[in-house]
Amino acid sequence: MKLNTGERWDLIDRISKETVTFGAYRHTLKDAIGELTVKPMTGIPVAIAVMYGFWSVFGSFAGFFTDGFFVRLFDAYWLPWLQEVFPGQGEWLYAIMVDTGGIESGEFVLSSNCLESFGVLTSGLFVAIGVVLPAIIIFYLMLALLEDIGYMPRLAVLLDTVLHRVGLHGYAIVPTILSLGCNVPGVTATRILETKKQRFIMMTLLAIFIPCGAQIGIMQDVVPDLMGWILLYLIIGYFVFGYILNKIVPGKAPEFLIDVPPYRRPLLSNIGKKVGGRVRGFFVVAIPFVLLGCAIVGVLYQLGVIQFLGDTLAPVFVGWFGVPKETAGPLIAAFLRKDLAVAQLSAITMTPYQMITAVVLVSIYFPCVATFAMMLKEGWKELIGSLAVLAVVVFTYGGLIHLIGILLGVA
Amino acid sequence: MKILLMGHPNVGKSVFFNRLTGANVTESNYPGTTVDYTKGWMKIEGGDVEIVDVPGTFSLDPKDRAEEVAVAMLHENRDAKVISVIDASKIERGLYLAMEIIEEGYPMVIALNMRDVAEDKNIVIDADRLERILGIPVVSTVAIAGEGIKELVSRLKEAKPVNVDDIIANAANASDTTGAADAGGAA
Amino acid sequence: MKKKLSEMDYNEQGTVTGIEKDLRKRVAGMGIRVGKELRMVTKQPIKGPVDVVVDEAETSLGLDMAGKIVVEVTK
Ligand SMILES: Nc1nc2c(ncn2[C@@H]2O[C@H](COP(=O)(O)OP(=O)(O)O)[C@@H](O)[C@H]2O)c(=O)[nH]1
Ligand SMILES: [Mg+2]
């Protein structure tokens, strides 16, 4: 026999009366902090402080290991050693695996650092291990702390108002932040949203506007001064296009209803396990793709495909987006790995504003292959829809950023 | 045999799961992480038993995709036993979900988890009495400390489907006896 | 005095006297039901969600939903 909602509660009331005694409840410090961090007057400043702290720790930790250790290791020891021992200098295999090198006054010269060499074993390994690994570890460590303490639901409550305007609700912060680590689990986490419409908007915004931890890590390393601009363009895009999508995508965008659990002391063993698992999961996907991406772009360079694409698409790149045509190469690599693409961009000479535009383009232009596969798993119709939105966004937003640059007199 | 760990988000299902299976899966304190469910195996009295860490849900009327997964998993496993994990400090809403599952005819044991938290909040639960009213095993536990888990496992075999009418009758009887006891005390 | 949950003031307490039918099942899992005591903890500005505590469990719900719950305010 089944009861209806009212009958069930009546029964539970009766059972509870017989078996449970509620003593006087004393409010604890934890409850007080819980309330302070959710009330807007105090909660919003705390949220800003938490986000700022997150960002600072992320930047300094990743910078400390990358610049302080890996750059030296790779540029001073690994690269020269490989350049020395790898056979066939100047031949195609050498170019793909170790160093493409350059031509200076008619002579072949070796690259001086791992960002310019473009080789699978040099740039590829350096990006994966030297830059992305520290960034990902610190990111997941801090995220696990925020999660296990129980801060995320409170952040969701505070952000609900703005996120509701783009057809989502506060809970959308969970897939959004997860995507800042890696878009793949971010796409999976869209399931906590109620309707198809919400999941579609979320997935599309993630795939387009949220750079992953690997990409942020490399951006911090190669274009630290431009980070503010790049992130600003991405955040504005997230909200502007979210707002538009909310207006045009049919369906419902229900309000949110969530449980706000009490703060808890995180278990160290649990944090360790969680960070370990996520970092491992990330690397199983990342390393092969970084190396493969490096190899494919290397081969395409050797075959002249990239030069051909660059020349063919030059009107679009130069005329519409205002970036050098050489960015065609990194944009192809971006499909495999965005971190790699940013690293390759950094080796192309261009103005700071062109760099901003190019990095934003790399971010928004196509989800990486792993994210693509994940979105396909969630539904091919949605994937096609997202890609259609993406095409429109890349053209309008890319052009708009160029236009803003022209108006500001910096492009 | 298959056992489903079910309950609200954040009640300790994953801690139970890890303790029961010893598997390397992650636990977390915020809803939305355990969307992909985890499966594991444990030995009970020599036999292999499959255990599933079902995503948290507040009721059997799913409000999002993650909850849909939870409900679908319950319905796909008509012959499974359910360990209903309840946060003892929020027992009423926990019982709401447990009742919904009982009403669908699943054999169940209840883990009244977070006994430590309930104690801190001065909430006292008469587990024996709850057990008599519901007609299924009710075990107090503190999952993070491993307390009560052995007993929970040993009592799994007592899980059986119960009729809601019996529970209603038991609840009525129980209140009669308290009424009588109170009257006796007053006399 | 009866008030909608969406109109309650900070820290006001009361007993739920009515929930619109289409919402009853949705909030049931959170322990919100007719006859229950609740306390309004806070609401977010610009039509943001409302936070309530029921049985020491905190729930946050959208303003429109809160408008469908009627509370007899006691203090
Ligand atoms: N104090 C206390 N905390 C617990 C207990 N069981 C689990 N927890 C904590 O509650 C949180 C949620 O547990 P988890 O297993 O992830 O919940 P799930 O969402 O049901 O899988 C974690 O931080 C656990 O460490 C318990 O018995 N007492
Ligand atoms: Mg879990």
Image (spheres, rainbow, N blue to C red):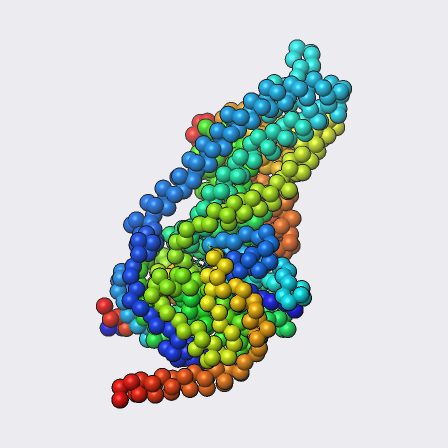
The x, y position of residue C9, in whole percent, is: 26, 62
Q: Return the residue nearer the eye: A381 or A154.
A: A154
Which quadrant: the C terminus of chain C? bottom left
Residue displayed at 59% across by 32% down = A129
Residue displayed at 45% across by 28% down = A225
Q: Return the residue nearer the eye: A33 or B21.
A: B21
Residue displayed at 50% across by 33% down = A62
The x, y position of residue B16, in whole percent, is: 53, 60
Q: Is residue A383 shown above or below A334?
A: below
Q: Return the residue nearer the eye: A314 or B165.
A: B165
Q: Quadrant of residue A309?
A: top right
Q: Is residue A290 shown above or below A273?
A: above
Residue displayed at 57% across by 69% down = B154
Which quadrant: the N terminus of chain C? bottom left
Q: Quadrant of residue A128?
A: top right
Q: Return the residue nearer the eye: B119 or A30.
A: B119
Total label count?
0
The x, y position of residue A114, in whole percent, is: 61, 24
Answer yes or no: is residue A361 visible: no
Answer yes or no: is residue A219 visible: yes
The x, y position of residue C12, in whole percent, is: 26, 65
Q: Is residue A396 shown above or below B3?
A: above
For the view shown, which residue lies furthest in the top direction? A105
